[in-house]
Image (cartoon, helix red, strand yellow):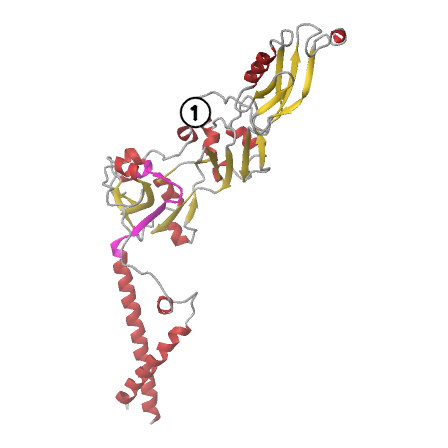
Amino acid sequence: MLKRLGSPLSAIMLAALLPACSLLPGTGPNSDAVNGNATAGLQSTASLPYALVDVTADTIGFLSQPNLITFKGEFPDKRPKPTQDIGIGDVLNISIFEAAPGGLFTPGQAAGARPGNFVDLPAQAVDQKGSIYVPYAGEIPAAGRTIPDIQQAIVARLRNRAIEPQVVVSLNQQHSSVVSVLGDVNTPNVLALNSVGERLLALIARAGGPKFEAIESYVTLQRDGKRVRVLLSRVVHDPRENIFIRPNDVIFLTHEAPTFTALGALNQNVFGFNSEIPFDVETLTLVQAMGKAGGLNDQQSDPREIYVYRYEERPFLEKLGIDTKRFIFDRIPTIYHVNVRDPSGMLLAAAFQIRSKDVMYVANAKVVDYYKLLTLINNTAATVSNTANAVTSVNTAEQTRW
């Protein structure tokens, strides 16, 4: 009876377990359901090509320098301040002086009442042709010229008509030399540039200042079709980055704290911390990143297998001596390998610069895989043993019953 009951019972248990798999808890469809119900798809076994770089004494010289994009480097303007030109839409005040009464603009009887012998013309807006109109001088080209140039042009037109004319031109309203300050500032606005020239931080301050801390804000400057993005804290700490702003520049602030992702055999993963970790500082080394992630897990990690994943520009990898001809795109997937089991490896890691959006991965030691396998075998053996004991108990109960 024992042999007769054992085999059917095992079959019944197996048959019951198979459909029960679909009833087990889950957060979504499994891979079989996804692949089996697809109407169309594109699948490939090809792996992504990447460059593998060992961090050594030969390469750390390049990797220890923060790869910081700077405004000064991208917009190398050596002028101390911009020369402000008049543009279309600007409104000018014009005053004309003559040396004696009885001239073109100052009648003789008005000399006593107006000792300056001058006249203020109505405010003149620069028209779409880029000109203003001055009586007896005609159209004066103004767009693209400085105020002194416009004054001299009016004087030249009036020299043979007025009595030793002198002209004073001033800016009444500015509509052409403006800057847009947008994004995460307290009062986004279109601002007129000061005639003496204004720097980047001054414009941000005029727009109410940033909504968030400088270490959590990026500032993007658009000029002449070029876009450059720099961490705001770098502009604050480095006066050379506080460059002069030009007419029609666009300044855009975004709230985005620099972060890196920490994966693998790290204490922060054991303790349940989040894997995406903010820098909290302007620059971060690999050693600091490991410290922020709780350090290497002594029970799991292999200190010889620490990796940093990122995309590098082709020219940078060529400086490292890597043949990049086999890569199609200019942004090349790159993995950096650091061995801190080597005594000098920790020094290399202390110099290696982490970048925002890097992925740091610490591999498990090989013995961990054996431990996992042994644990699986032990659990499986325990399950089989428990099942066998249950079958034996059932058979014993059946045998006792009969």
- Residue 36 magenta: no
Q: Kindly identify the residue that appears in the image at 26 percent across and 37 percent down.
A: 318
Residue at x-position 23% and y-position 35%: 58
Quadrant holding the C terminus: bottom left
Task: Identify the residue under disc 1.
Answer: 77
Q: Position of residue 26 (x, y in %)?
A: 42, 67
Position of residue 1 relative to residue 372, above or below, is: below
Residue at (28, 85) in percent of width and height: 7
Outermost residue, top direction? 100
Q: Identify the secondary structure beneath mark 1.
A: loop
Up-down relation of residue 180 to residue 101 (above or below): below
Q: Is residue 358 magenta?
A: yes
Horizontally, residue 373 falls left or right of residue 294, namely: left
Magenta range is: 346-367
Residue 158: where, in percent of width, then height? Answer: 61, 12
From what the image shows, is residue 395 above or below residue 105? below
Q: Nearer the viewer, residue 59 or 208?
A: 208
Left or right: residue 5 compared with residue 235:
left
Question: Which is nearer the eye, 73 or 141?
Answer: 141
User: Which residue of the protein is positioned furthest toward the bottom in this rendering?
Assistant: 402
Give the side of residue 227 with respect to residue 338, left or right: right
Inspect the image, locate mark 1, and give the three-letter code of the amino acid beneath it.
Asp
Image quadrant in which the N terminus is located: bottom left
Q: Is residue 103 left or right of residue 293?
A: right
* Residue 252 place in picture, x, y as percent: 51, 38
Residue nearer the viewer, 95 or 30: 95
Q: Is 91 above or below relative to 393?
A: above
Total marks drawn?
A: 1
Question: Dot 1, crowdedness within 10 Å: few (<14), some or many (≥20)?
Answer: few
x, y percentage for residue 135?
A: 65, 18
Depth order, front residue of 217/380:
217
